[in-house]
């Protein structure tokens, strides 16, 4: 018995050492933590229960028989974050560069299966050079097993991927299939083919940073949602995201003890909309004034900045925030912002998080490129997502809600539960200038002073159509409120809607425009 215990302890100790002291030092010299150090930061102290610590590969070719390490380059198991159960895996770059193997897949799949069956979030810490070439097609098949489970878990349990080093080749698809991707500003990379392969095939020269660095995927491709300055901040962001999300799709999001008065009003909101209808303002100021103090966490802040999405709390309850951003491209809807909004709305709907939408958009972005690259198809995603969502939905029109964008941004026709408007709202089929030239073209053609006539007709149009009162009169707006009343109005409405029950027609799945 003593010999057996000694052997077990030796193997466990070897597993704890990863690739050995020299490899660990190299990892630290790069400014990176080891897999176990990352898990120690992520999980509550003493809560980690490891699985598969002694698993090793069975390769004998290419000198691999001499390179067996307990755990095979990945640490998997269960733990707790702020007392809530989670499933985790962390790739260990000190062991064979964290290369993805059949054993890694088996360990990840086991954790994925248990997480799905137990209804708990899954968190992956990625740091790998890609597939283990020595395993050939077996490593490729292993990827497929993980992808399948990512898809089956989608919308059932929260899935968060944290990129803390390279993530290349087939490895990128698992994070892309998860709900959120977090990258560190330095040292995180994602790409299907690396710079050397690209140069050999296309002749293009590009650095790893320019090809698949953090800001590429946060600002251009939209693959990642959050940027962290370092590994510690990335782990803190992971914890913060989880604090807004339920354990699974059958639960409500966690509520915290209210700390901000529900009846608080902000007088400054009554003067926040500029007198000039074309003057921009930052919608974040409205959001931060309305939600619980310091509770707003923006998601995708660098991508499609004409739209804004994120999580916040109202009276301690989690809510999803969607808003047009007038300070960037006047808040128009375009291809990227449509994708951004639609994806976030579907995440909120999947995890029972009410959606609050702040509307100020002049419409969809015109242009040949937008039309040719599919603004119709992408714009339809917003409509689809809002129509499909069965969670409580409340919209507030702060200024412009013009044309098709008015409909898309959670209008009554998109099954919005409560539609509010500020007195500054402008709800119409089109802007005053364009509308006057259509409605009064005969009078303008006959006018001796067309410029003066246009101004007169514009004034008439604004008085008659370019305000929220006709929409309220027709029942398209439920209530016109003072801006300062927005917070208490939202909290009272959500209190009523919290027990909302609504189901979509039975079906296998809808055919969302993709």
Image: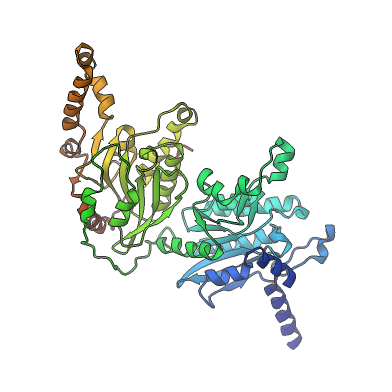
Side of 284 where 209 appears, left or right: right
Between 48 and 213, the one lying in front of the other is 213
Side of 175 where 84 appears, left or right: left
Q: Residue furthest top?
A: 446
Side of 68 where 409 appears, left or right: left
Q: Position of residue 119 (x, y in %)?
A: 48, 63
Q: Is residue 202 above or below residue 390?
A: above
> Toward which corner of the image does residue 312 lie, by quadrant?
bottom left
Q: Position of residue 499 (x, y in %)?
A: 28, 58
Judge whether residue 489 can be spotted in this image: no
Judge whether residue 44 can be spotted in this image: yes
Q: How many marks?
A: 0
Q: Is residue 458 above or below residue 177?
A: above
Between 172 and 468, the one lying in front of the other is 468
* Residue pictured at 44% horizontal, 50% vertical: 301
Q: Position of residue 514 (x, y in %)?
A: 49, 38
* Residue pictured at 34% horizontal, 34% vertical: 363
Q: Is residue 420 above or below residue 470?
A: below
Q: Quadrant of the N terminus?
A: bottom right
> Toward which corner of the image does residue 255 lie, by quadrant?
bottom left
* Residue pictured at 47% horizontal, 46% vertical: 303
Q: Position of residue 67 (x, y in %)?
A: 79, 65
* Residue pictured at 39% horizontal, 44% vertical: 307
> Toward which corner of the image does residue 295 lie, by quadrant?
bottom left
């Amino acid at each position: 018995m003593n010999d057996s215990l000694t052997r077990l302890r030796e193997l466990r100790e070897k597993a704890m050492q990863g690739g050995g002291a020299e490899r660990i030092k190299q990892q630290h010299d790069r400014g990176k933590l080891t897999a176990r150090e990352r898990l120690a930061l992520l999980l509550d102290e003493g809560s980690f229960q490891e699985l598969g610590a002694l698993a090793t590969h069975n390769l004998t070719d290419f000198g691999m028989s001499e390179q067996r390490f307990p755990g095979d380059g990945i640490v998997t198991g269960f733990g707790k974050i702020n007392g809530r159960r989670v499933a985790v895996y962390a790739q260990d770059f000190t062991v064979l560069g964290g290369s993805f193997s059949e054993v890694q897949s088996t360990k990840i799949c086991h954790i994925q299966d248990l997480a799905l069956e137990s209804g708990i979030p899954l968190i992956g810490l990625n740091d790998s050079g890609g597939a283990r070439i020595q395993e050939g097609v077996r490593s490729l098949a292993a990827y497929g097993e993980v992808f399948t489970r990512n898809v089956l878990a989608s919308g059932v349990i929260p899935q968060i991927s944290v990129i803390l080093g390279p993530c290349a080749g087939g490895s990128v698809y698992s994070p892309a299939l998860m709900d959120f991707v977090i990258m560190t500003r330095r040292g995180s990379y994602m790409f299907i083919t690396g710079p050397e392969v690209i140069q050999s095939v296309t002749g293009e020269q590009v650095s790893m940073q320019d090809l698949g660095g953090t800001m590429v995927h946060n600002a251009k491709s939209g693959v990642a949602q959050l940027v962290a300055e370092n590994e510690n901040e990335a782990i803190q962001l992971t914890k913060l995201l989880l604090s807004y999300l339920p354990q699974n799709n059958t639960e409500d999001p966690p509520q915290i003890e209210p700390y901000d008065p529900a009846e608080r009003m902000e007088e400054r909101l009554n003067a926040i909309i500029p007198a000039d209808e074309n003057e921009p303002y930052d919608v974040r100021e409205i959001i931060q004034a309305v939600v619980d103090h310091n509770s707003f966490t923006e998601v995708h802040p660098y991508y499609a900045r004409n739209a804004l999405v994120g999580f916040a709390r109202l009276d301690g309850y989690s809510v999803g925030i969607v808003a047009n951003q007038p300070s960037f491209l006047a808040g128009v809807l375009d291809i990227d912002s449509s994708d951004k909004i639609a994806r976030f709305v579907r995440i909120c709907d999947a995890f029972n998080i009410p959606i609050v939408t702040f509307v100020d958009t002049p419409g969809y972005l015109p242009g040949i490129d937008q039309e040719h690259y599919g603004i119709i198809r992408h714009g339809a995603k917003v409509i689809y997502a809002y129509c499909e969502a069965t969670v409580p939905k409340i919209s507030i029109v702060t200024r412009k809600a013009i044309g098709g964008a008015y409909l898309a941004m959670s209008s009554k026709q998109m099954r919005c539960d409560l539609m509010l408007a500020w007195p500054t709202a402008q709800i119409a089929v089109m802007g005053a200038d364009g509308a006057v030239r259509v409605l009064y073209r005969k009078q303008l053609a006959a006018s001796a002073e067309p410029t003066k006539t246009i101004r007169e007709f514009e004034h008439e149009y604004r008085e008659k159509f370019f305000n929220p009162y006709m929409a309220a009169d027709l029942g398209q707006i439920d209530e016109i409120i003072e801006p300062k009343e927005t917070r208490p109005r939202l909290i009272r409405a959500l209190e009523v809607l919290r027990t909302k029950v609504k189901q979509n027609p039975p079906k296998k799945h809808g055919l969302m425009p993709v």
